[in-house]
Image: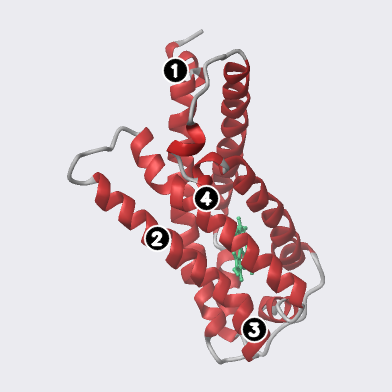
């Protein structure tokens, strides 16, 4: 086994992969949120559809999409392997630890929160990504595929809006732990800067998830 294979199949190596991919996915969330803010423009979706057309036809963005899929894939796969290892280690341990008293609920339920996000992602990708790329979509006044109409129509359904808001709550809790934890795994800890990273992580999680949750609520109540 080469040292690279050895390093990345050790528990710490796998944790590093989870941290790097997790922080990379955070950057995707920012780009996705900023792009989607165009949904709030009162132009019947022209700006949003132009943006979506650019994103789906630009070569560099297509390459970024492959990296994104790999990022999600590694993040999920390595987490499953680590969770299984931890479960095996814990089942052979006989001392009682007080993990419940030492860490918040979100930190002990990252797997559950991640699974909720994954279910959301499958529904989300089918409804928007798949229909946009492979379904029948009308054209807007500018001649672009009218993805805005699909988004607007979806967010008129109350349970769909509820699903989105619930998924953003799960994402928020996942990030509240994951953001700072990622930095810690990479060894980026410092007496002075760790509290700052922690606070930036809190602000990031709340702002990003509130921004995403605002979209279905906006269409449901104001459109
Ligand atoms: C209410 C909030 C959201 C809206 C309105 C929204 C909207 C969209 C739309 C319209 C697409 C298709 C765009 C295209 O194919 O060019 C898309 C794709 C995608 N979304 Fe979302 N999204 C939201 C939240 C999220 C969240 C929270 C995540 C991740 C946890 C996410 C992950 C993705 C991924 C991975 C893709 C496929 C990659 C891409 O096309 O860029 N989305 N989203």
Q: Is residue 147 above or below residue 119?
A: below
- Check if mark 2's residue and mark 3's residue have beta carbons within 8 Å: no
Question: In the image, what residue occupies the spot 28% across and 37% down?
Answer: 188
Q: Which picture quadrant has residue 43?
A: bottom right
- The residue singled out by tag 1 in the image is 7
Q: Is 159 situated above or below 92?
A: below
Dots 4 and 1: beta carbons under 8 Å? no
Q: Which residue lies furthest to the right in this view?
A: 136
Mark in the foreground, 1 or 2: 2
Q: Name the residue under label 3.
A: 219
Q: How many labels does the image show?
A: 4
Residue 204: image tag = 2
Find disc 4 in the rendering and name its residue. 174
Tell me: 6 left or right of 118.
left
Instruction: State yes or no: discs 3 and 4 in contact (Cβ < 8 Å).
Output: no
- Residue 151 appears in view: yes
Residue at x 44% of width, y 23% of height: 12
Q: Tell me which numbered mark, 3 or 1, is placed earlier along the sequence.
A: 1
Secondary structure at badge 4 equals: helix
Residue 217: image tag = none
Report the front residue among 107 and 20.
Answer: 107
Q: Distance between the residues labelled 1 and 2?
A: 31 Å
Labels 4 and 1: the sequence-earlier one: 1
């Amino acid at each position: 086994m080469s040292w690279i294979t050895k390093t990345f199949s050790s528990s710490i190596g796998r944790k590093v992969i989870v941290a790097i991919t997790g922080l990379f996915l955070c950057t995707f969330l920012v780009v996705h949120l900023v792009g989607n803010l165009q949904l709030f423009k009162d132009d019947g979706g022209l700006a949003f559809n132009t943006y979506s057309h650019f994103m789906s036809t630009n070569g560099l963005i297509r390459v970024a999409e492959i990296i994104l899929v790999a990022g999600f894939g590694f993040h999920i796969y390595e987490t499953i392997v680590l969770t299984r290892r931890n479960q095996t280690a814990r089942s052979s341990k006989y001392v009682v630890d007080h993990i419940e008293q030492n860490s918040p609920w979100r930190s002990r339920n990252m797997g559950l929160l991640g699974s909720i996000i994954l279910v959301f992602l499958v529904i989300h990708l089918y409804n928007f990504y798949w229909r946009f790329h492979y379904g029948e979509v009308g054209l807007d006044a500018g001649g672009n595929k009218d993805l805005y109409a699909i988004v607007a129509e979806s967010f008129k359904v109350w349970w769909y809006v509820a699903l989105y808001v619930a998924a953003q709550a799960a994402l928020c809790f996942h990030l509240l732990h994951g953001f700072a934890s990622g930095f810690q795994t990479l060894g980026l800890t410092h007496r002075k800067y760790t509290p700052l990273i922690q606070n930036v992580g809190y602000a990031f999680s709340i702002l990003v998830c509130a921004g995403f949750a605002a979209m279905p609520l906006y269409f449901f109540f104001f459109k």
